[in-house]
Amino acid sequence: MATKDQIFHLLGPSGLTGINWKNVDHVRKVVASLVQGAYVLEQDRQGKREGSQALAPPWWETFGFQLKRILVDKADPSIFGAIFEYKPPPSSCNHSADGPRFVVAFRGTLIEDESFVQDINLDLQFFRNELHSSSRCKTAMQAVENVVATAVDSRVWLAGHSLGSAIALLVGKNMAKRGSKLESFLFNPPYVSAPIESIKSQKLKQAIQVGICVATFVGALANRSVEELNPSADSFAALSRWVPRLFVNAVDYVSSGYISYFERQAGMQNMGARAIQRVVSQHTLGSLFLSENGTQAEPLHLIPSADLTINLNPPNEFVKAHAICEWWNPDLKLQSKVYKYDN
């Protein structure tokens, strides 16, 4: 049975009669809607809703997009993403020259009978830093490579929510390493860390931040020599020109770690501690633990640069604060800052 969050005219963004692709609010709402479309595609499949009964199409057709291809996980029959092509009618007032040609959108974990087990398994793979080896990530990577090969890559956008944003981030990193810096929109991307954003005391929070930096720096040096660390830092810095857009809030403990992460990088940069920053920015305590057990693990969720948008008035409940529908709420109070890695 359909729920409210699947029905566009009940929950979707309203008032977007024309899209101005230079308007960041328009862009955020439209891209988030496409990601929701990926969710509802899978819910339509499980609910056996087809044709006029399908609920997914309004989530993209409303904004002039067409469904080009669905992405199916090889490990189960679930739809985990979709490729949308922007084809507004000639009479449209949308500024198509500034928008994408294709958007590849990935959904997150879906609590439904036929997808739940595989989605949770992938969540666990993410926390073990093994998501890149999954069939879903490999399918996503191949799909994006194919789209980029047939289009000017600057007009190919990536988008995802939660687990889907982790997949989009991995794909975006790999494409950036190859020279294709794709515009990317990561809603509530998971970050492996203690949820220190929930701490009210700024002094305590800063003390914990310093402690994390020191422990990470010492741990990295204990595991690898300076000679080994430098090439790794250079490889990490090479990604700095790719600036994905991250959308997070402090109540969402899944993604709030990115707030502290970029604040730490900026703090060290401002203090002139570039040598420490180069090491700390590409490691986590968890990745160092894996290294101690014989695995040199690059933390796949870490990135050198980002355009970080924080919702300053999120819902008080975690489930609502983590939901994709948060990002087309008309009453958002947002704070954005671009963090650029200093080479």
Image (spheres, grey):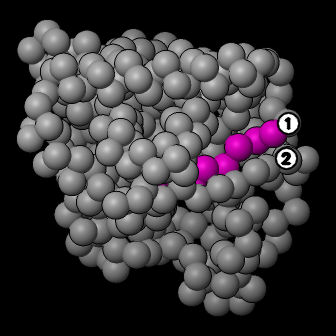
Q: Answer left or right for 1 relative to 218.
A: right
Could you say where residue 185 lies in the image, as x and y percent from the top left? 53, 53
Would you place residue 68 above or below residue 220 in this image?
below
* Residue at 57 percent of width and 87 percent of height: 97
Would you place residue 327 above or below residue 124 in this image?
below
Q: Kindly tell me whether residue 334 is visible in this rendering.
A: yes
Name the amino acid, label 2: Leu
SS type, badge 2:
loop
* Residue at 85 percent of width and 36 percent of height: 313
Could you say where residue 284 lies in the image, as x and y percent from the top left? 36, 25
Could you say where residue 124 lies in the image, as x and y percent from the top left? 36, 15
Mark 2 lies on residue: 332
237 and 118: which is toward the camera: 237
Would you place residue 204 above or below residue 245 in this image?
above
Q: Could you say which disc has been placed on residue 313 in the image?
A: 1
Q: Identify the image quadrant of the N terminus.
A: top right
Q: Which residues are magenta?
A: 305-312
Q: Could you say which disc has been placed on residue 193 in the image?
A: none
* Residue at 9 percent of width and 38 percent of height: 228
Instruction: Specify the farthest residue to the front.
Output: 272
Assess whether residue 153 is covered by the magenta stretch: no
> Cβ–Cβ below 8 Å for labels 2 and 1?
yes
88 and 141: which is toward the camera: 141
For the residues labelled 2 and 1, the Cα–Cα distance comes to: 7 Å
Task: Classify 10 Å Cα crowding around label 2: few (below 14), some (14-19), many (20 and above).
Answer: some
Name the amino acid, label 1: Asn
Task: Classify 10 Å Cα crowding around label 1: few (below 14), some (14-19), many (20 and above).
Answer: some
* Residue at 34 percent of width and 61 percent of height: 343
Residue 47, quarter of picture: top right
Could you say where residue 336 lies in the image, as x and y percent from the top left? 70, 54
